[in-house]
Image: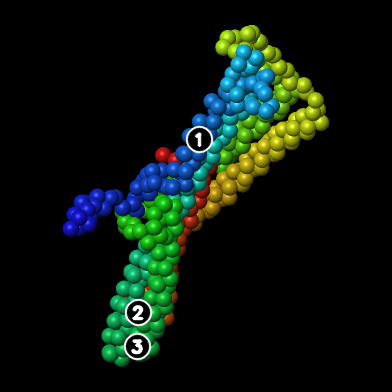
Amino acid sequence: MLAGALWTLALPVTATEPVPGHSLESIRAWVLEHNPELRALDFEAQAAEARILPAGALPDPMASVGFRGLDPDKPWRTAGAERQVDYAVRQRFPLWGKRGLARTAASQDAVAIGLDRLTTARDLLADAETAYARYWHADQAVAVLDRRIALLRQVEEMAGVRYALGRAAQQDAIRAQVEQTSLQRERIERLATKQEAAATLNAVLGRRSDAPLATPDEAPRLVVHSASLAAALDGADAHPAVRSQQARAESAHTNVVLQRRNRFPDITVGVGAMQLGNGLESTELMLEVEIPFQQRARRERERESRLLEEAALARRDATLRAVEERGASAWAQWTSARERRGLIENTLLPQADATWQSALASYQVGEVDFGTLLEALNEWQGADLARVDALRDELLGAAAVRAIEGDIR
C-alpha cells in the first residue's frame, strides 16, 4: 500500500515533466539545464575558483615542544626542577611577491576552466542543433515519400482503368507497384535514420537513448549573423577555446616569473619559551633563512616553466587555426546548401511540377506512355526530397557557423 501511494504521488510529477523536441528552443534550453557534462564543468569551475585563495595563503605555522634533561633510564619521571621544556612556534613567510603570483596563476587557471565550460556549451548546442535538424529532416523525408507513394497508387489505379479499357498494357500497373515497393524500402531506411537521429539527440540532451521526443512543430530556424566569411572569422580570436588557451599561456608566464622569484630565499620567524621547573626561565626569537644551495634543480624548474609557456602559446595558435578552419568549412557548407535549396525551390520544383502536370494530362489522353509519366513523377517528387535534403545541409552548416559566432542564447 505504501509503494502504491508513493507511485500515485509520483505520477503527476512524471506527467507534467516537459518532453523536448517540439521546437529548437526546447532543445537548447534542455541542454543548458540538464546536460551532465555541463554540470560537471560547472563543479570543476567552482573548484578552480576555490583554489585561488589557498594558492596565495600563508603556509600553516609549526608548533614544537622539546624536553631536555631527561633521565635516560627513567624518561617518564615527573618533572623536577632540573627538567627543561622548550616551546616554539614558527611561521614561514614567502617574500618577493610569491604569494601574489601564485594567486594570480590560480586565478588565470580558473578563468581557463570557465572558458572551457563555455566552449563545451557551444559545442553541445551545435551538436544538439545538428541532431535536431537530422531528426526533423528524417520526419520530413518520410512525409515526402508517403506523398510519393500515394501518388503512385493513384497512377496505378489510372493505369488499371486504362488497361481495362484496352488503352494501356498491364505492365504499367505492375511497374507502378514495383516502384511503390522500392519506395517502401527507402521509407524503412528513412525511419531507421530518424531513430538514429533521435538516439543521438537524446544523448546530447543527457537522456536515455529511447526517451520519447515530441514531434517538431515546424522547421528549425538557425540564423547566421555574419554577413561574410571574413566577418565570421574576425571573431575567431575571441572564441572561448582560443581565450582559454590564452589564459593558460598567461598562467604559464606567471609561473615563469614565480620560478625566477624562487631564486630569492624565504624566511621563517619563530618565537619560543623555555620552562625550567614550574616557571619560565627565558624566551627566544628565531629567524631562519633558506640557503639557495640546489641551483641546478632551480635552473631546471625555471627551464621547465619557460618550455610550458612556449607550449601554451603554440597550443593557442593551433586552437586559433583550428577554429578558423572549422568556420571556413562550415561557411562553405552553409552557403552551398543555401544556394542549392534556392535553386531547387525557385527553378527545379516549378519546372518538375509543370512537367508532371503536362505528362499526367498527356497520359490521360494517350499521348505519352507510362514510362514518361512515371519519370515525370519521380523527377517532381525527387526534387521535393532534394529540397528537404538541401535544407538539412543548410541547417547543419548554420549550426556549425553559429558555434563559431558564439550564439548560445
Residue at image coords 34%, 65%: 143
Of the two numbered discs 3 and 2 on the same chain, state the one appearing first in sequence: 3
Q: Position of residue 221 (x, y in %)?
A: 39, 48
Q: Nearer the viewer, residue 129 or 96?
A: 96
Question: Reading the chain from its start, which is encountered first: label 2 or label 1?
Answer: 1
Quarter placement of the C terminus: top left
Query: Is 238 placed left or right of 209 in the picture?
Result: right
Whether label 1 touches label 3, CB < 8 Å: no
Label 1 near label 2: C-beta < 8 Å?
no
The three-letter code of the residue at mark 1 reads: Ala
Q: Is any atom of residue 280 visible in this view?
A: yes
Side of 366 where 271 appears, left or right: right
| In the rendered image, the vertical position of residue 234 relative to residue 4, given as above or below | above
Q: Would you say 98 lies left or right of 174 here? A: right
Q: Residues within 10 Å of mark 2 (few under 14, many from 20)?
A: many
Mark 1 lies on residue? 47
Task: Find residue 92 and report its image quarter.
Answer: top right
Element type where label 1 sits in the image: helix
Q: Please state which amino acid type lies under the numbered disc 3.
A: Ala
Image spot of residue 245 (x, y percent)? 61, 37
Q: Nearer the viewer, residue 351 or 93?
A: 93
Q: For the residues labelled 3 and 2, say whether their Cβ atoms are less than 8 Å apart.
A: no
In the image, what residue type sits under mark 2? Tyr
- Residue 132 in picture, x, y percent from top left: 41, 54
Residue corresponding to mark 2 = 363
**229 or 213: nearer the eye?**
213
Residue 168: mark = 3
